[in-house]
Image (spheres, rainbow, N blue to C red):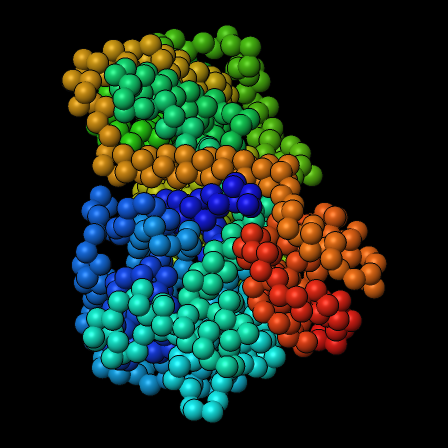
Amino acid sequence: MGNRGMEDLIPLINKLQDAFSSIGQTCNLDLPQIAVVGGQSAGKSSVLENFVGRDFLPRGSGIVTRRPLILQLVNSKAEYAEFLHCKGRKFVDFDEVRQEIEAETDRLTGSNKGISPIPINLRVYSPNVLNLTLIDLPGMTKVPVGDQPQDIEHQIRDMLLQFITKESCLILAVTPANTDLANSDALKIAKEVDPQGLRTIGVITKLDLMDEGTDARDILENKLLPLRRGYIGVVNRSQKDIDGKKDIRAALAAERKFFLSHPAYRHIAERMGTPHLQKSLNQQLTNHIRDTLPGLRSKLQSQLLSLEKEVEEYKNFRPDDPARKTKALLQMVQQFGVDFEKCIEGSGDQVDTSNLSGGAKINRIFHERFPFELVKMEFDEKELRKEISYAIKNIHGVRTGLFTPDLAFEAIVKKQIIKLKEPCLKCIDLVIQELINTVRQCTNKLTSYPRLREETERIVTTYIRERDSKTKDQVLLLIDIELSYINTNHEDFIGFANAQQRTAANATKKRAMPNQVIRRGWLTINISIMKGGSKEYWFVLTAESLSWYKDEEEKEKKYMLPLDNLKLRDVEKGFMSSKHVFAIFNTEQRNVYKDLRQIELACDTQEDVDSWKASFLRAGVYPEKDQTENEDAINSSDTVSMDPQLERQVETIRNLVDSYISIVNKSIRDLMPKTIMHLMINSAKDFIHSELLAYLYSAGDQGSLMEESAEQAQRRDEMLRMYHALKEALVIIGDISTTTISTPVPPPVDDTWIAKEPSPPASRPGTASGAPPSRPPGVRGSTPGPPSAVNPSPAFGPPVPSRPPGDPNSVPLVPSRPARVPPALPPGVPRRPPQVPARPNHW
């Protein structure tokens, strides 16, 4: 007898098909199977019913099979049927099976001959069947009927191709004998996807309906259109027999009698008929599965590896574990804390290369956005000079002052320091918003527990809001501290003595390093279509100029714009534009580029705009002031006295204020990030690690807190089912493969047969005792082991001289039959090998 391990192959594939179908996915595996194809009313369904020995498939004229039927035959002592969509229900009455197939078909396709590619899974247990899995596909048709769409022929063809194009699928091509084989739809479509004929098995039906005087002997002897796996003839019940409820067992007996009594088929009767077809398909499918095992195993392993990452988080959440919810809560909170810290502090593992994380965005706020907001508070020269002159005059009162008053300096400095409160508070608000976004991002992993996610988000967000007020209070305190004492003895303060020389220094301050490159990057210049349209260029910003090139190689310079008298201006985003825009203009009302008074520069995101603005600030290009303020300053400038002595005093205080405010700005820029980190960010991290769990326990019942969402529970169950199915499949495949390799089965009868061979083919004994790779290249699906590779079936009757050597019909399907070898067989065997080169045209 053959390798017992091989008998488990077909049930294994059945398990995989059920597991993947119930989950609603194929796991990207092409499982070995047999697809039944043929024209309408070719007898496909009758062949399947003969296998089972029961009437269970819908019958009638026209298109009856309108959805693929995956029929899994399982050898069992009991006889019943099960549908995958009716789990737990056993159908003992096969009339109910037919009704269920019809009802399930109509449920998706309607009652007017429509079709659907979604399969119906039916498993039949019976002592009369061999393990076999077949897919009954709709018959090919030419003309639409009923409510069928006009392209019904192409729809059915596409559906068939979905199954039979896979290399792992054997094709059972069913053709009625009373039509010309050359016009067979089944063989035609099979040849398209299997031109070598390696996967095609021919079945000839309706042999009893052929015209008198004709027969299909040449076809069945594989002479007319040879297939490597050959043809098998069957005789099904007629419509009259079906209507008369003729028993299938009686029909099978009549079929055998037909082949034994017909003069054209008598010599091949042992390899004709439904029982032989079922045995042949069982062995060929088993061997085909064995041949595809290496590829299937590698696919299973790759799928298992891809699932392991997702299943890892589910392994600890076993429903039968009473402490599961507590474990899950602890793990979730701990993981949330780790994720939050990684987002803020940065991490080398799993780096996001598409978006900035929370910590990177906060860093940008600290060092780009906040300095930009500070510079936006830059003094307006005319307004500042007017305030200084008023302060000096008001301090002197009715007297004309000879010396510059200190009180004027202090009053102006305090007024400018107070203006720092707004950008500082705005900076805190930006950081708060980014922290809340980071919390929401980190709670995405808690989606399996909606209530836990909601409570975690609420508790942490509430805590951050509380820290918000404390941080703002601390920052305002810092500014109040700066206001409380004006330290004119600071080492960086220029003092009164140097204030006069500061004027010349101011002129050169912003051009300290003219060749320094501050920033490079792509920007789009927005120009109207009439003037050429918007174009993207590579920009290079230095301390002295703004240049743009055709590309980043910086070889073809388009223009260079000096930074003198340039300022920044905000521009509203266009209605149809997705880009964010800002503008550069000349304060002296001159054209900036060609005939344009301002250049509009566009970026993809607002963050890029803020970053470019900060870079322009470093180059000394500042944002413009509010237009109304400028106009008021111009209108009121006439009232300012032009007294030379007063002007000198104003200039001196102006330089002192500028020096001292730069010291304060430097101090605030340094202390703001430190204050926010200490009072808000580090505090939030400590809270999550040490107190969040206690707050969650006090928030409500742990049971309700750890209730899984229905979607997550379903997804976890499906994932675990798929994971265990794949693991089990790999174990079974491993066992079968090991058994197959380590236990060769040489039937003794084959050795006897080889001994009887005449001497001419001297190399045959060595071939017979060799390893399985010595099988003829044309043979596919033969029984594993040496004998089956060379032993033609004794039950096949007298030899057919022109039968191809690779014909599987010359391979024993039941190794225990060689006792019935006709005497004429051995002499015929040596006559066949010389014909190998004579028949290279196998399809």
For this view, does 351 lie left or right of residue 709? right
Q: Quadrant of the C terminus?
A: bottom right
For this view, does 364 lie left or right of residue 558? left
Count the numbered circles shown: 0
| Identity of the residue drawn at 37% across and 44% down | 19
Q: Quadrant of residue 808?
A: bottom right
Q: Where is residue 591 shown, x and y percent of the image?
A: 52, 58
Q: Quadrant of the N terminus?
A: top right
| Identity of the residue drawn at 39% across and 44% down | 15
Residue 472 appears in the figure: no
Residue 707 appears in the figure: yes
For this view, does 366 lie left or right of residue 58? right
Q: Where is residue 651 shown, x and y percent of the image?
A: 48, 27
For this view, does 491 lie left or right of residue 480? right
| Identity of the residue drawn at 37% across and 28% down | 314
Q: Where is residue 521 shown, x and y percent of the image?
A: 58, 46
Above or below 99: residue 749: above
| Identity of the residue drawn at 35% across and 57% down | 71
Comparing 413 with 426, the one in front is 426
Comparing 144 with 668, the one in front is 144
Comparing 688 with 693, the one in front is 693
